[in-house]
């Protein structure tokens, strides 16, 4: 038996054992061949790329390197009731018509992004903040459900969840009674984010694959096809994978999963619902945080009881007060909890919360601790504040929330607004951190974002103090850089400027939509609620907030001051040009030279609009191999149909 044959046989047995849970040989047979391979590798000095001996873990790393993902990894928006889920399904169907959904388990572990190049495992990283994660290649290499080679030529990033099975956790704690692991989620996360790969190997983790990110040459058009591809690569995939077309069908699957949840040998914290068709996903698009084509239905989180010691009120950039509960320290989901959100005063009253009394606490969405309600009668009544805790101004009540209206002189509001304006996604004024903003407000009397543009190097030098300052040296270089960054921020684009203004509930995506629709802040300031709600993603609450912002005199005064300084960006949509201008195009079947996403992007760059289904409004259907019902419908409606060869010719004519 050659070395490659030994490796192939061992990997086949490992796949049967770890992925299929159906071993065909006893451990003694596997171990005997494995020992022969180890001996042969030592004798020859050759270790094949997919050899199982890579799984044992190498030397301890000194630190984690950063890894930039080839394509951004988004997190998922969440719903926690069937009412919210129905609203999401209705919103999707209103936007793109009837679609097929997939329903999968939401595993409770650590997201891993694995890269393969020409079929070989070349790296793995944590999700991080979606763009940059930690390189955990050596750690993930030890996980036996991550193939070291796959039958795919090209480059792809595949995502999965690193988990520790509950049965494995139990066995581990039996072997380590002096240092037991608290829970499976933290055990998996801690093992992967451990500088010693041997620790990862010792915890016997799994990775359950469920998604793809960047790919070159991966020709799949649906989530169903993707799952088939992942399984063909020998990967562990979702224990539950079902399709549904209606809310009622989705609900029935979720209820069934909920009944079986306690019988699973792994932790789940919910269910993920996705639009199955990838072309439809691209039509739905993304917000600045989440894909619009997927949502996580969260199960009720673990909860505990503890004492609510006190309540403190925080003031945000819009003047809204948020109550924060100070708790007697308690362990929850493997973390020590001492603070939790109370949402607003109406929430405090409705839940009958009192200081000094026991309350129920849970990890809301398993991240933010939340007080659910009172666990006993008694305690000290929590009084509704009448004045701002920061500036002592009288508060006003709007709906369920309390607001400080002293926007011009309330320090927390001023600091928060300026910090937001300077942030990277806004005006991107480098060198001004949150701490620096506090110094600008406290020492230089900065009251608004417009005041930033009158700051001088000498003023800034006085607040940029380092240890060298004590010796008489002033950090003038940093002051020069900040002045230059402030000057450069005058070139800000309109979408960034709208986001920088700090409109309530307006993120970067909505800011871009507003810029595209209105073209200038002046036009936006005149928009009515009726105008605003015509924009996708802008509802009544967001529209009301935008109108109210521009109705406030101090906000318009700052905008006029910025305009006088030279900050009045405008936004002009370039006229569409290209061979597909004015055409609504449907792609169907498998293309030989492009993925569905690549072809869609090329069509849009050439002025076309992508549609997910064939209707009378569609002008063109491009067909690849195995085109199905969409082709038949296009022919029945008399819509122009072209093949991939003609598509390539049209692109060449651009």
Image: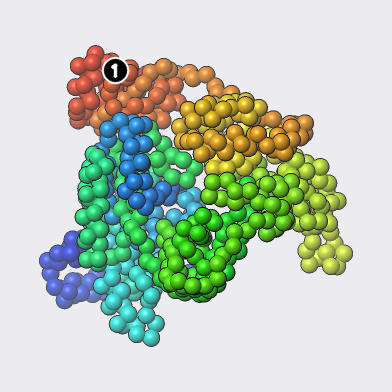
Q: Secondary structure at mark 1?
A: loop
Inspect this view and state whether residue 43 appears.
no
Q: Name the foreground residue: 449 vs 329.
A: 329
Q: Residue 447, how many percent across, how many down?
A: 76, 47
Residue that extends furthest to the right in the rendered view of this protein = 472
Q: Report the colour scheme.
A: rainbow
Q: Residues within 10 Å of mark 1 (few under 14, many from 20)?
A: few
Q: Quadrant of residue 182?
A: bottom left
Identity of the residue drawn at 57% across and 59% down: 323
Q: Name the foreground residue: 238 vs 557.
A: 557
Q: Quadrant of residue 35?
A: bottom left
Residue that extends furthest to the bottom in the rendered view of this protein = 178
Q: Residue 487, how many percent across, how many down?
A: 75, 40
Q: Residue 222, how many percent across, how many down?
A: 27, 40
Identity of the residue drawn at 63% across and 29% down: 525
Q: Residue 418, how many percent across, how many down?
A: 69, 47
Q: Is residue 213 above or below residue 195?
A: above
Q: Is residue 132 above or below residue 628?
A: below
In this picture, residue 45 sits left or right of residue 193: left
> Which image quarter holds the N terminus?
bottom left
Q: Which residue is mark 1?
A: 616
């Amino acid at each position: 038996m050659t070395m490659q044959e030994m490796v192939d046989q061992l990997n086949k047995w490992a796949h049967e054992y770890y992925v299929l849970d159906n071993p065909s040989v006893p451990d003694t047979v596997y171990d005997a061949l494995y020992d022969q391979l180890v001996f042969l590798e030592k004798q020859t000095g050759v270790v094949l790329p997919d050899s199982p001996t890579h799984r044992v873990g190498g030397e301890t790393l000194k630190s984690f390197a950063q890894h930039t993902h080839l394509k951004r990894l988004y997190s998922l928006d969440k719903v926690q009731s069937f009412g919210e889920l129905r609203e999401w399904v209705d919103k999707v169907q209103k936007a793109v018509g009837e679609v097929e959904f997939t329903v999968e388990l939401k595993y409770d572990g650590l997201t891993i992004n694995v890269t393969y190049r020409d079929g070989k495992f070349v790296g793995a990283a944590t999700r991080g903040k979606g763009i940059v994660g930690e390189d955990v290649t050596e750690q993930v290499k030890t996980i036996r459900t991550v193939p070291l080679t796959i039958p795919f030529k090209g480059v792809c990033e595949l995502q999965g969840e690193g988990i520790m099975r509950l049965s494995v956790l139990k066995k581990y704690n039996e072997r380590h009674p002096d240092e037991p692991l608290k829970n499976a989620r933290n055990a998996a996360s801690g093992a992967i984010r451990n500088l010693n790969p041997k620790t990862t190997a010792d915890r016997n983790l799994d990775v359950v694959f469920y998604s793809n990110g960047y790919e070159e040459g991966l020709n799949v058009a649906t989530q169903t096809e993707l799952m088939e591809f992942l399984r063909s690569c020998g990967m562990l995939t979702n224990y539950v994978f079902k399709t549904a077309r209606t809310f009622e069908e989705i609900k029935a699957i979720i209820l069934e999963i909920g009944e079986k949840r306690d019988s699973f040998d792994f932790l789940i914290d919910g269910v993920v619902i996705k639009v199955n068709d990838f072309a439809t996903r691209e039509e739905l698009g993304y917000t600045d945080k989440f894909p619009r084509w997927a949502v996580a239905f969260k199960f009720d989180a673990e909860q505990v009881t503890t004492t609510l010691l006190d309540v403190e009120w925080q003031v945000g950039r819009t003047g809204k007060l948020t109550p924060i509960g100070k708790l007697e320290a308690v362990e929850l989901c493997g973390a020590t909890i001492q603070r939790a959100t109370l949402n607003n005063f109406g929430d405090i009253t409705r839940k009958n919360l009192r200081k000094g009394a026991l309350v129920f606490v849970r990890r809301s969405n398993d991240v933010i601790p939340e007080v659910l309600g009172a666990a006993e009668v008694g305690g000290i009544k929590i009084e509704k504040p009448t004045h701002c805790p920061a500036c002592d101004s009288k508060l006003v009540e709007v709906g369920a929330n309390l607001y400080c209206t002293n926007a011009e002189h309330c320090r927390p509001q001023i600091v928060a607004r300026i910090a937001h304006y300077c942030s990277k996604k806004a005006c991107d004024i480098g060198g001004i951190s949150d701490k620096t903003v506090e110094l600008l407000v406290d020492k230089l009397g900065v009251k608004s974002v417009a005041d930033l543009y009158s700051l001088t190097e000498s003023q800034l030098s006085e607040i940029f103090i380092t240890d060298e300052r004590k010796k008489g040296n002033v950090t003038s270089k940093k002051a020069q850089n900040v002045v230059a960054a402030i000057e450069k921020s005058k070139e800000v684009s309109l979408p960034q400027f709208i986001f920088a203004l700090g409109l309530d509930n307006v993120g970067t995506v909505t800011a871009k939509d507003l810029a595209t629709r209105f073209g200038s802040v002046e036009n936006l300031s005149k928009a009515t609620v009726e105008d605003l709600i015509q924009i996708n993603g802008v509802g009544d609450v967001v529209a009301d907030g935008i109108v109210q912002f521009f109705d406030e005199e101090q906000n318009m005064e700052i905008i006029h001051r910025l305009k006088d300084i030279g900050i009045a960006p405008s936004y002009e949509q370039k006229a569409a040009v290209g061979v597909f201008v004015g055409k609504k195009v449907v792609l169907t079947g498998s293309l030989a030279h492009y993925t569905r996403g690549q072809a869609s992007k090329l069509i849009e760059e050439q002025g076309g609009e992508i549609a997910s289904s064939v209707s009378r409004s569609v002008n063109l259907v491009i067909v690849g191999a195995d085109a199905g019902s969409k082709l038949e419908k296009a022919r029945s409606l008399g819509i122009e149909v072209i093949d991939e060869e003609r598509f390539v010719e049209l692109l060449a004519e651009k």
